[in-house]
Image (spheres, coloured by chain):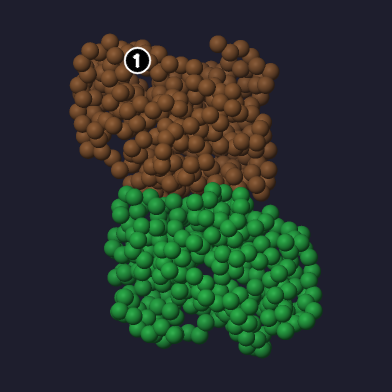
Chain colours: A green, B brown
Amino acid sequence: METEDGRWAGRTCLVLGGGGFMGSWLVDALVRRGAEVRAYGRISQFAPRREDVTWLVNDFADRVALARAIEGAEVVFHLLGAGTPESSNADPYANLLAGPGATLQLLNLCRSEGVRRFVFASSGGTVYGIPQSTPIPESAPTHPISAYGVAKLTIEKYLHLLGHLHGFDYAVMRISNPFGPRQSPFRRQGLIAAILYKLLRGAPVEIWGDGSVVRDFLYVGDLVEAFVRVAEYGGPVRVFNIGSGQGLSVNEVVHGAAAAIGCADPRIVYKPGRQVDAPANVLDVSLAARELGWRVETPWAEGVRTTADWMRGLTGRASPKRGREGDLAK
Amino acid sequence: METEDGRWAGRTCLVLGGGGFMGSWLVDALVRRGAEVRAYGRISQFAPRREDVTWLVNDFADRVALARAIEGAEVVFHLLGAGTPESSNADPYANLLAGPGATLQLLNLCRSEGVRRFVFASSGGTVYGIPQSTPIPESAPTHPISAYGVAKLTIEKYLHLLGHLHGFDYAVMRISNPFGPRQSPFRRQGLIAAILYKLLRGAPVEIWGDGSVVRDFLYVGDLVEAFVRVAEYGGPVRVFNIGSGQGLSVNEVVHGAAAAIGCADPRIVYKPGRQVDAPANVLDVSLAARELGWRVETPWAEGVRTTADWMRGLTGRASPKRGREGDLAK
């Protein structure tokens, strides 16, 4: 466990999306290092509420609240998403406003407030679209097949623009598929959470397509370490793939997760594939290793077991505070 | 001169930006081929008003007018810009709404109306940003250094998305620096028009930077031929560079233009460079040659002379109908 760190002690950090799955872990890591942390967005559904963090429960589109949150912040982490890849395609225009639109307003405020470092959580799983080959380096073509991915990519382009025009200091993390405790099993994002939830209840696991789709899964503890290192990094690279660098098919995930938690015979129901899913996505993470000295340290099965342990506590509850309770009642 | 063409006769074409510099020439070319042409946007400043074209003088943001314009159109050419590279950087948010935002609304309408082919005028001069080398192929990295370029690129990404998700049939033309008659010498875009205007009046030519910036200039007559071929093309390529493939420095343009119109001793005033200008931009146009059989046919100096001939008529007028009359009165 980290202790107070001179690079972070007393520095004011704003985590946009600090109540989300990734954000709540990042908040914890920054507090442990001694930073003054503000968390903006929704209240966490699954993380314990911390008293040593300033919670700003506001909408991303609320510019007045946003301006107040940014005042005096040295480092801003932008983890606010706009829906999921699937939902974004139903209304790309709304997604454009909620993602790049709101982010441009945010960046204006960050520039006028003199924010010193801006870290953006982009999406290694969607900005590349259907890759020519895997693992995918940062220099690969970017042709997203979801409006969610287009929005993430567009924000990256605006960051590059502000860096060029105004010397704005930023970094982009193209994150693969994160998993771990506190990831909701009730959303359409988060395959491992959804699978574990079903397995633990003895329910059939639903898979879109034939299960051959390959993804790069990253344990949230390793991801949070990458966030911190990217924020500290002072070198010339702006865009980093952040993933495990290893591909697992959905079928491998189901059987591996079942084995990890001692479920002998998982039931699988195959459903029609989704056009929003690229057949394979595995990130080349050698740049992050070289520039940040960062690499994955948690074996996949260990991460799955830790997640399952957390989820056992969750499924033991009569009803979660939020989320789609209908799913639980089934 | 082209005559009525079976591929175009009686087909309804909508030219968004049909009153602009490129659009007005495209309208002429389509009418000559026998198409039913609707021109949407502002009235042309310099083109003669045609009676055989349906003029729809409306704002791009007017969705009702846009829906009416698209009704029954088979081919839609999207040439509506949003400001200039320089002006866009003053307010990227406004530019995002006016460009990608309005275009997403347009694309929704085109899909629901069953438009059969959509041709988008993107910008080969801005989507690549500062190139690693020239000439630039379509596969080169895209890191725009103007919000204008980010907006054009974002629209390209949405077109790719709609092609993937819905089979929407589109093509993208990454156009270099077009020039020719009807290009306004009073705007901050259109270097050759601005230079010729000054030369013809014996005024000093103002250059941003030291004149070493290299650009790819394309005569509008050749460009319009490319528009038609891209619209007719039924192959798999979606994105084409459309340029001369030849680089000329700004200094070469000034001296070459002066020589072409018989001005012995042009006066040049050098002003500070602009951050929005990439040092060089020359397009690799071999893909368009191979797939479309298209290539530049007008020698640069001939294009300049034709443009100068047109402009002599313009400068002879007491006052243009529109434009910044202050510039003329100086």
Residue A119 percent across, percent down from the top left: 41, 64
Taking the spot 58% from the left edge, 13% from the top edge, the residue there is B2
Q: Secondary structure at mark 1?
A: helix
Residue type at numbered disc 1 = Ala
Q: Nearer the viewer, residue A220 or B314?
A: A220
- Tell me the crowding category of disc 1: few under 14, some 14 to 19, or many 20 or more residues within 10 angstroms, Cα based: many
The picture quadrant where one finds residue B47 is top left
Q: Residue at x 40, y 13 (%)?
A: B302
- Residue B179 in percent (x, y) is at 40, 24
Query: Which residue is denoted by mark 1 in the rendering?
Result: B308
The x, y position of residue B1, in whole percent, is 55, 11
Position of B112 with respect to B274 (left or right) is right
Residue A49 point in image, percent of width and height? 48, 84
Chain name for mark 1: B
Q: Is residue B283 above or below residue B147?
A: above
At x 66%, y 62%, the residue is A214
Report the side of A98 relative to A6 (left or right).
right
Residue A191 in view in this figure: yes
Q: Quadrant location of the N terminus of chain A?
A: bottom left
Q: Please, is residue B217 above or below residue A213 in the view?
A: above
Q: Which residue is at the front of the view, B325 or A256?
A: A256
